[in-house]
Amino acid sequence: MANIKSAKKRILVNETKAARNKAIRSKVKTAIKKVEAAAAAGDKAAAQVALQAAITEIEKAASKGVYHKNNASRKVSRVTKAANSIA
């Protein structure tokens, strides 16, 4: 355990930020899974609705610095491709 006051504060701040980032990542993963599930079921309407929600979550995460912008862009591209693959 740290003895210096500033080091103790850094530990607390890092825990708080890690919890926030974990929650945001979890939201993104859940949104992506919903799109993939709708695509696997062949439900185009549900996939399009889930796609919009997923893109929103991914863009929010990127704007907050949880994901790098290129990583977010790649996720959007992949999830869009999955949604559009429905015949």
Image: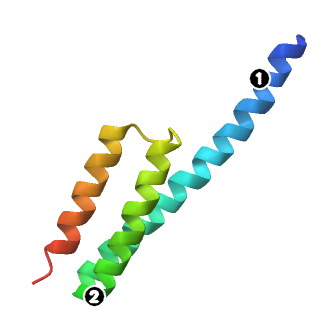
Position of 33 relative to 39 (above/below): above
Residue at coordinates 25% horizontally, 80% vertically from top-left? 40
Label 2 neighbour load within 10 Å: few <14, some 14-19, many 20+: few
Q: Tell me the kind of residue under disc 2.
A: Ala
Residue at coordinates 17% horizontally, 64% vertically from top-left? 81
Regarding residue 26, the answer to whether it shows in the image is yes
First reached walking from the N terminus: tag 2 or tag 1: 1
x, y percent for residue 26 = 53, 58
Which secondary structure lies at badge 1? helix
Residue at coordinates 48% horizontally, 52% vertically from top-left? 60
For disc 2, the marked residue is 45
For disc 1, the marked residue is 10
Choose top left, top right, bottom left or bottom right for residue 35: bottom left
x, y percent for residue 43 = 26, 89
Using the image, tell me which numbered label, if any, was put on residue 42.
none
Q: Quadrant of the C terminus?
A: bottom left
Which secondary structure lies at badge 2? helix
Position of 46 relative to 57 (above/below): below
x, y percent for residue 44 = 23, 86
Position of 9 relative to 81 (above/below): above
Q: Are marks 2 and 1 in contact (CB under 8 Å)?
A: no
